[in-house]
Structures are given as C-alpha cells and as structure tokens.
Image (cartoon, rainbow, N blue to C red):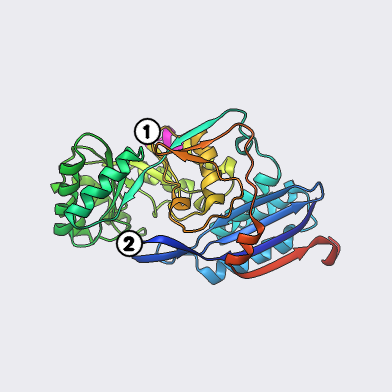
Amino acid sequence: MIEHVIVRQVALPLSTPYKVSQGTMYELNPFIVEVHDSEGRAGFGEALIAPGYTSETVEGSWQLCCELAKAIAGRSPDEAKEIAQKAIPRGVGASSAVLAALDMVSNHYLLSPKRDLTVPLLSPLQADEPTALADEIEGKLGEGFRTFKVKVGFDWRDDLRHVQTIQSLVGERATLRLDANQGYKTADGMEFAKRLDPRGIELFEQPCHMDDWKANAEVAGVSSVPVMLDESIYDVSDIDRAASIKGVGFVKLKLKKIGGVDMLVAALEKIRENGLTPVLGDGVSLEIGCWTEACVAAHSIDNAGEMNGFLKTKSKIFKNPWQFENGSIHIPAGYSPDICQEELDLCTRRLQAYNASKLPHK
C-alpha cells in the first residue's frame, strides 16, 4: 500500500546559463514526487513544466500533482498507477512524475538493471565567439562526447554562419544535432534548412511552433537534413502524424510527455514501427529523470541520449551518483539511487505531504 506521498517543487541553479530560442534558463525548477509504501520502499519521479514548450501550466501541474498524491495515498501500487494514467489527458507532466515514482517503488525491471549499462550522451555547445567555440569543442571532445547539440532558431543567417563555423572546427570528429526550439517562422526556417551543408549533421529539430504542423512540414520538405519533431509530440497519435510528413526522419520523446516507463518503451517502439528513428532524453531533468530515461535508453535506443540535465546543475541530489566518463553515463548492475534528503530539503521551494493514515478511509 502507498503510505505517504510528498510533492515538492525545487530550484537548482545551473553552472552555466542555458540559452535557447525561447529565452535563457538560470535554474531548473521541476516538481518532484516522492512515494513511500508500507514495505519501506521509496520511489521518485520528476517533471519540469516549461511554459512555451507545452500547453501545461506550472500552477495547473502543481495542483494536479497534489491532487494525484492525495488520491493515491492508501491505494495499492496498481490502483495508484491506474489513477495517474487516467489523469494524463489533464496533464501528462504531473501524471508522469507520479507514474515514474510508482515505477521505482514497484521495482520496475528496467529500473533494476541486472547488467552494467552504458549510455552515450550528447553535449550542448554554448560559446558564440570562434576562439571560445574552438576551445569548447576541443574540451568536449576530450571529455569523450561525440554528438553535439547546436541551438539555432534566432536569426537564420547568423545561425547558418554559426553552424558552418562549428562544422569547420569539428570536421568528422563528432555529429551535430541542430535544435531551433520552435524559434523560426516558416519562411526563415525554410531558408535556413535548405542552405544547410549536410556534412556531419544528423538532424534538425523542431523548426517551428509545436502547434504549427503545416509550417514544420514545409520546412521539412525543403530541408537538406532530416527533421526531428519534439515539442509537437505529446501523444502516440502524434507519432503517426509525424511519420506522414516528408522530410521528418526522427521523433524525440521525454518521459514527462508520455507517462510511465512501459508507456515510454511502447512509444519508442511505435516510432520505429513508423519507419522513423527514436531519440530520447530531457535536457532539463535532474538526476531522477535522467536516471529513469537512461535505464530506458539502454533498452530502447541506439543513439546519443539527451538526458543531460544533471550535468548542468551546480549541486546534485543523489548520494550515490552513477559514474560519468568518456561522454557516457555508466550505471552498474543492481544500482538504485539514494536521495540526499538534506540537499533535497535545501533546494525545496514548496511542499505538500499526504499520509494515508490522516486521510478519510478509502
């Protein structure tokens, strides 16, 4: 039985501001759901709600997290999962945080690896000035990264020059993923995409607004590299829709946009069934979300993961962090994360707790 559930919102400052077309992030402030059962087991899930990347709102998601926490306290894990799954249409981010915590507390087989796992990651490139950019690239290559994310979606001419500079500096030593984060209008996205030199570029991510499927299709139709949809994908039906668009070759998923672990595995397989390539990972998750996605990635994808948010924060919340070296996450067999309660309390900004013994009988 689920004995008590804690919902909190935390704030962890970033080591370096993270610039995207929608603005600049200085901290990660996700919701964390903590579930404890009658057998003494604990599970954690998280989801960061970023306005502009989803139709969900921060306050609405907070309220739903709290509502679900109260509803599952006193329930069996299976009953709790059913409650959270039914809430997905109302807010997949909040629901996914609850479902991930329940997957952990239930010892989901993918979260209890029987073998050592290695998941290569990509790394963002953030410098602008050529000398600084060259130093950053050499440093990242030295750390073992072989896939870089380049943020575009600003002025398409400047973006094109920036990409060309990176291509000349990287050569054949790494692969590039370009990410516009919905930043382009249709015409600008088309001008940028059709002028790209495809050498070393794996994909071009989310050119236009997530709801403007026509604009994204027009850009994909002229792009010299495959387009990947990310923010546009919030339901498995969106995967079918993406597969119908000429020029779309990739779909990216995050746990917080799908639900629980089994739902994520099924959605990744659906991408492949549609003839597209799945990409996985949330670049603005803490260790909790990154660990969950890495466990799924080792099972379900064969390219660089994007679950690198844990590398961006100044402080960490795991007492027993996994090893990170040579550009990859290394999770040993039998690993289970241990949360540092003191650090978690220090970064908590608001909290609600629900105990089954103090709630009306269910």
- Amino acid, disc 1: Gly
For label 1, count other residues whose C-alpha is less than 10 Å away and answer few (under 14), some (14-19) or many (20+): few
**Residue 179 left/right relative to 263:** left
Observer-nearest of 280 and 166: 166
Residue 5 lies, in percent from the top left, at 72, 59
Label 1, label 2: how far apart the Cα atoms are: 32 Å
Image quarter of residue 245: top left
Observer-nearest of 278 and 350: 350
**Residue 272 forms part of the magenta stretch:** yes
Quarter of the figure that contains the C terminus: bottom right
Res. 203 visible in picture? no
- Amino acid, disc 2: Lys
The relative height of residue 281 versus residue 55 in the rendered view (above or below) is above
Residue 43 lies, in percent from the top left, at 67, 50
Q: Which residues are magenta?
A: 270-276
Observer-nearest of 93 and 161: 161
Mark drawn on residue 19: 2
Q: Secondary structure at mark 2?
A: strand
**Residue 229 left/right relative to 128:** right
Residue 104 lies, in percent from the top left, at 66, 45
For label 2, count other residues whose C-alpha is less than 10 Å away and answer few (under 14), some (14-19) or many (20+): few
Q: Which residue is mark 1?
A: 275
Q: Kindly give the residue lying farthest to the top in the view shown.
A: 115
The relative height of residue 161 versus residue 9 in the rendered view (above or below) is above
Mark drawn on residue 130: none
Residue 149 lies, in percent from the top left, at 31, 48
